[in-house]
Amino acid sequence: MSGVPGPPEPWNEDLLSAYADGEVTAEQCALVEARLADSESTRALLAEIEAARDAVRALPMRDAPEFWARILDGTGLDATDLSDDTVIADAPASVVTLESRRASRLPRWVAVAGGAAAAAVIAAVVLVPGPKQVDPPVASFTDAHAIRDSLNSDAVSSLAPVALQAGFQR
Amino acid sequence: MTHVSRRARAVGAGLAAVAMLAVGLVALPDAQADDAAEVALERARTATVREDFSGIVQIEWLADGNWQIARVPVTGEGGTVQVGKGNHKAEGSGDDRWIASVSGWRVGWTQPVAGDVPSPTKHWKLAIAKGPQVAGRTTDVVTATDPKTKEARLKVYVDQNTGVMLRREVLDRRGEAVRSVGFVEVKKLGGARSAAPATPKAKNAAPKQLGSVPKGYDAPARIGTRYALVGRYLRDDGTVQLYYSDGLFGISLFEQRGSLDWNGLPRGGGGTAIGDDRGRDYEVAGGTVLVWEHGDLTLTAVSDATVRDLQTFAVAFGQQSGDDGGVVDDIADFVLGPFGFR
């Protein structure tokens, strides 16, 4: 019975995402390409998935924010240690069957688009410059006030402090 | 009935007239005192332009509970006032001001002031009386009292002969002196006029007058019920300078866009709270200085008013300046705050 082919796989939009990532079997590949040949909407959907994937890949590489380093400090890992296979904690892994996982997850293109949006937000946070820091020249401000004040009050009492060292310590 | 009513009305009118006269007689001396004191203050404001003088001025200020003292020579010739010597000098003539430092003279002001300063009697009760001798001169003293607290907050001693201000004394809310600037030696006062000294050759560093402040800065027309905005200026370092006055005390408020670099501030000073914002205050020869952050602005207020008065001013500024941007800004704070971008 092992040589007998099973029933043809039903159409599932998840296959498009897997196809775009090159993660389909030969049988699934044939199924997707047949569908693409017949369906304008399927071709459009694939184009959307590929655009979202390209957008994510086009994002610049940035150094991780400082808080990420602090998280890594807590794990004892270095950023370069992290990969898909990295196990951060020795928690017992729960077993999820492929069938239940497939049934519960959203279509992969939605996940990719969501990931792209999240990545765009993080990129914006990293790239948008914060307000500059300013260092008020308080001694100069004190002189400037004395000058302005002297125009509306007695010039001697207003200007006399300008003739002194301001008294600020650096 | 009609006759009785007319008579009652006539009696009532007579009583009212007597009462008004009595009130008027009581109020008249106060009003006269206010007027005479205001005239003395105005005369003192311009006396150093009309009279030649020379002497030593002493500046005293209370910092961390200890009195600090410094002295500077002053002269007035032909309407030009000069204070200090060597590389620390300031000079004023008409609407022009110059400051000398180790890098030479620079122009501090070149234009007439346009804004109207409130009358001192608008927020203060003034009184004038015979004062003590100051630097060997006979004085009248003008006392400004806060009508709400009944405490004296400023005393100005003026020369009886020339009207020149000989001493200005700032008092705290308990009526105790915390700062003064005054002559301790008068070598010359009044008499023959000399020619004004030559104008210094100076690099222009005068601020530009603004009709309105640039976007992102705040310039409330009034701070609290007391301080009126008199002028807005742009310094050559990009700082916006606002000048407020209540008629007796002037406050300069310097606004810079950006967050305060706390490590860049001078050492010393005291930590203080400005509503929900934190700040630092200094008491130096040049006055009281308060630095704090509010929204996207770093603010520095300078005045010869007390620290507490500056704090009150700063809190009122926070309440009256432009709002913080509302919900959008709150969300931005929430999202960006952890990354140190707000």
Image (cartoon, coloured by chain):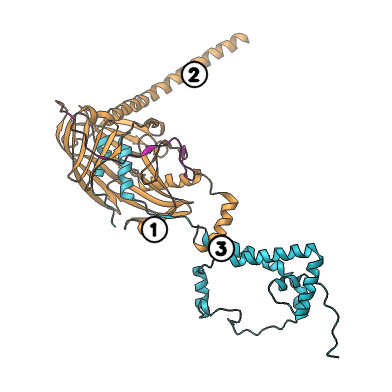
Q: Residues within 10 Å of mark 3 (few under 14, many from 20)?
A: some
Q: Check if residue B198 falls in the magenta segment.
A: yes
Q: Residue at x 80, y 74 (%)?
A: A31
**Image colour assigned to chain A:** cyan
**Image colour assigned to chain B:** orange
User: Mark 1 is on which residue type?
Assistant: Trp
Q: Look at the numbered disc 3 and give the secondary structure of its residue.
A: helix
- The residue nearer to you, when weighing A156 against B261, is B261
Q: Residues within 10 Å of mark 1 (few under 14, many from 20)?
A: some
Look at mark 3 in the image and give the residue it sits on.
A123
- Discs 3/1, front: 3
Look at mark 2 in the image and give the residue it sits on.
B16
Q: Residue at x 77, y 71 (%)?
A: A33
Look at mark 1 in the image and give the residue it sits on.
B262
Q: Is residue B91 above or below residue B69?
A: above
Q: Look at the numbered disc 1 and give the secondary structure of its residue.
A: helix
Q: CA distance from mark 3 to mark 1?
A: 29 Å
Do the residues marked 2 and 1 share a common chain? Answer: yes
- The residue nearer to you, when weighing B71 against A96, is A96
Magenta-highlighted residues:
B195-223
Q: Determine if residue A160 is in view.
A: yes
Can you give x and y, in whole percent of width and height, for residue B281 in the image? Answer: 36, 52
